[in-house]
Image (cartoon, helix red, strand yellow):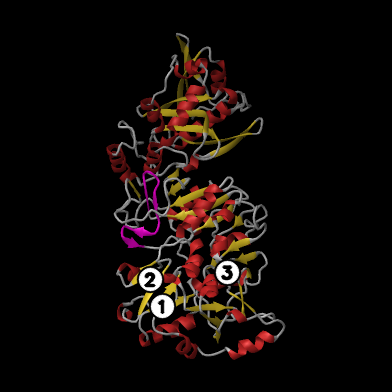
């Protein structure tokens, strides 16, 4: 390495034209690596593509093809073979027609392949860099990922020097003396404009956002759904980024002050990435920005490093998931669609991190709606990218399924209930055949195809007790059983007007599988999504003849006398009124003075009739009381 100004002569001596240098360094049988994604050296790639017919048995290796390489390799089959670690839109057809090859590999392991595997040893590396600084260092800019490892391992390195390449900080630099030849050529960098949001992606994003807490560190994969997730995090604070890829969606949150990295436990205050794909605005933002560091994949994708981030959340998409939790993310049957990439690295790392979460997002069906993405078994030939044990949450436009620590039966039921409604009965029947679920298992009647998330609300009660109220779900069955078993015998008697001692599956599943229209049940829960404790339950059932609904509710003993029952009754009234129900009725033991007091404070004229120690109570929404008292009790 030259110090001072000695490097400048070295640099000038090795400046040449693309065609000339390629004629000098390319030989038959060479394995040539080309910089990937939006960092592809387009000018060099274009020159190489035109020269391929002059050679025999070349191998071109790339991570993600987005630029100047051919899509159709038919006429070049005798001259060159293309290999890729990630199948993108420009290489997908060739790979699946057998004209190009896919190399399944974790991103974190690719540098070792270059160094240690003879089948991946590189003769030539073509990359794109920023102009050298005053010390002779060039930055790999928006594509450090595996480009740096390829340059370090390759016999010969040719760099396209482009003034439009951002100078990114971190472990992104190569000294000019580490490069053998330079081609100075200015051209616009490749840019990616992600597709407009879809209603499905936005609904998935809203569910995912409920799983993300202030101060979390995020890794979000590539794609429409992933970008929609980021757009819905505007209300979160002090988020951090440790991710393979940075896009304009991340920039959106940075500009709005949501991504600060202040609470990151590793690289505090820094955005850590290995490549960028987006707009010129994104590239300008990361240029010479000390808040952003780019590092190779062996660092960014290191599972031990990822697991050191407290609150690490990995959000990745899938193509298919079976009822046991096996995830296919890189192929549709035998047809390769993408690649493993950093998927497994981040999923494993996040699953081991303190308060870490792994989230799989996918639309419930294919684009044409003919095929369910939730299946009893993966398609023939589909690859298992993520095993059953790694996934914590699965999210579709129909809700969230929490799988971590759950049995196969519980997983199957949770996933069936976030599948598209038109596939649920078939999935349930197949699950029964496989003995995954109870043989008498039922599903909610489908009146509203979407879970009524508009009736979710947090409420703070005396003692700073925060309770989350939401419509009941089929997956609440065990939590509801535990709720009832936790109640004293007297409360059970008050609630059911009988001395019940058991709450079997056949009864509780009926209570949890409702249509949300003629029957509504709201649970008050505490704890993390999927591991919640039911502390309150209220429901009504509509009598369509009278248009009045019978209501009942109960509160766990140690949560009573905080106003939870009053809130629950008022909330059920609000829901019932929105659905055009005329009023509510109830049956209350005369001895249950607490429950009677709640009804008399509801704010409507109470009609009551006492018979054999039981009050029949009713009130109509068009008969408000003169005074509505809402004090807690």
Q: Are marks 3 and 2 in contact (CB under 8 Å)?
A: no
Residue 269, image x, y percentages = 67, 58
- Asked if the magenta segment contains residue 333, the reply would be yes
Residue 3, image x, y percentages = 70, 81
Q: Quadrant of residue 53?
A: bottom left
Q: Nearer the viewer, mark 3 or mark 2?
A: 2
- For the residues labelled 1 and 2, the Cα–Cα distance comes to 9 Å
> Which residue is found at the position 43% from the left and 42% from the top?
451
> Which residue is found at the position 36% from the left and 44% from the top?
323
Q: Secondary structure at mark 1?
A: loop
Pick whichever of labels 3 and 2 is earlier in the sequence.
Answer: 2
Say if 158 sits above or below 197 in the image: below
The residue labelled by disc 2 is 91
Pick whichever of labels 1 and 2 is earlier in the sequence.
Answer: 1
Q: Quadrant of residue 381?
A: bottom left
Q: Are marks 1 and 2 in contact (CB under 8 Å)?
A: yes
The residue labelled by disc 3 is 282
Q: Quadrant of the N terminus?
A: bottom right
The residue labelled by disc 1 is 69
Q: Quadrant of the C terminus?
A: top right
Q: Secondary structure at mark 2?
A: loop
Asked whether 343 or 365 is in front, the reply is: 343
Say if 474 sits above or below 108 in the image: above
Q: Secondary structure at mark 3?
A: helix
Say if 417 sits above or below 198 in the image: above
Instruction: Judge the density around disc 2: few (<14), some (14-19), many (≥20) Cα neighbours within 10 Å.
Output: many
């Amino acid at each position: 390495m030259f110090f001072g100004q000695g490097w400048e002569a070295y640099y000038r001596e090795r400046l040449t034209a693309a065609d000339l240098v390629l004629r000098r360094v390319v030989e038959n049988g060479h394995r040539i690596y080309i910089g990937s994604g939006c960092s592809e050296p387009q000018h060099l790639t274009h020159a190489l593509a035109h020269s391929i017919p002059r050679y025999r048995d070349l191998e071109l290796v790339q991570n993600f093809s987005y630029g100047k390489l051919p899509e159709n390799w038919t006429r070049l089959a005798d001259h060159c073979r293309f290999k890729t670690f990630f199948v993108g839109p420009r290489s997908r057809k060739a790979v699946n027609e057998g004209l190009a090859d896919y190399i399944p590999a974790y991103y974190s392991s690719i540098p070792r392949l270059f160094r240690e595997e003879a089948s991946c040893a590189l003769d030539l590396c073509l990359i794109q860099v920023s102009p050298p600084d005053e010390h002779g260092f060039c930055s790999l800019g928006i594509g450090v990922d595996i480009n740096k490892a390829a340059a370090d391992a390759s016999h010969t390195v040719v760099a396209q020097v482009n003034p439009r390449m951002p100078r990114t900080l971190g472990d992104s630099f190569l000294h000019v003396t580490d490069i053998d030849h330079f081609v100075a050529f200015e051209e616009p960098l490749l840019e990616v404009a992600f597709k407009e949001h879809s209603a499905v992606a936005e609904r998935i994003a809203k569910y995912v956002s409920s799983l993300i807490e202030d101060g979390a560190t995020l890794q979000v994969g590539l794609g429409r759904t992933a970008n929609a997730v980021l757009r819905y995090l505007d209300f979160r604070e002090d988020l951090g980024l440790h991710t393979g890829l940075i896009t304009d969606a991340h920039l959106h949150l940075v500009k709005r002050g949501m991504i600060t990295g202040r609470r990151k436990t590793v690289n505090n205050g820094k955005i850590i990435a290995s490549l960028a794909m987006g707009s010129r605005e994104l590239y300008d933002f990361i240029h010479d920005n000390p808040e952003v560091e780019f590092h190779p994949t062996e660092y960014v994708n290191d599972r031990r490093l990822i697991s050191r981030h407290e609150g690490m959340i990995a959000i990745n998409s899938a193509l298919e998931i079976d009822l046991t939790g096996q995830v296919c993310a890189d192929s549709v049957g035998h047809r390769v669609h993408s690649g493993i990439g950093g998927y497994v690295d981040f999923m494993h790392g996040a699953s081991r991190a303190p308060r870490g979460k792994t989230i799989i997002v996918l639309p419930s069906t294919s684009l044409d709606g003919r095929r369910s993405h939730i299946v009893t078994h993966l398609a023939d030939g589909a690859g298992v990218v993520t095993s059953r044990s790694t996934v914590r949450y699965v999210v579709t436009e129909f809700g969230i399924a929490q799988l971590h620590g759950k049995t196969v039966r519980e997983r199957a039921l949770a996933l069936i209930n976030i599948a598209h409604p038109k596939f649920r009965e078939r999935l349930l029947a197949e699950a029964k055949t496989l003995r995954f679920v109870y043989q008498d298992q039922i599903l909610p009647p489908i009146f509203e195809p979407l879970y009524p998330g508009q009736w979710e609300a947090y409420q703070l009660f005396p003692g700073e007790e925060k309770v989350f109220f939401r419509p009941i779900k089929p997956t609440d069955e065990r939590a509801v059983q535990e709720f009832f078993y936790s109640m004293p015998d007297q409360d059970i008697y008050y609630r059911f007007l009988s001395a019940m001692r058991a709450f079997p599956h056949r009864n509780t599943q009926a209570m949890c599988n409702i249509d949300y229209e003629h029957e509504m049940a709201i649970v008050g829960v505490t704890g993390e999504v999927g591991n919640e404790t039911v502390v309150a339950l209220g429901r009504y059932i509509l009598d369509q003849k009278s248009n009045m609904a019978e209501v009942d509710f109960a509160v766990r003993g140690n949560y009573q006398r905080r106003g939870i029952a009053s809130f629950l009754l008022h909330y059920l009234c609000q829901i019932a009124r929105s659905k055009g129900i005329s009023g509510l009725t109830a049956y209350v033991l005369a001895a249950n003075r607490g429950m009677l007091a709640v009804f008399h404070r509801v704010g409507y004229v109470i009609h009551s009739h006492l018979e054999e120690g039981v009050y029949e109570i009713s009130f109509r929404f068009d008969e408000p009381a003169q005074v509505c008292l809402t004090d807690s009790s």
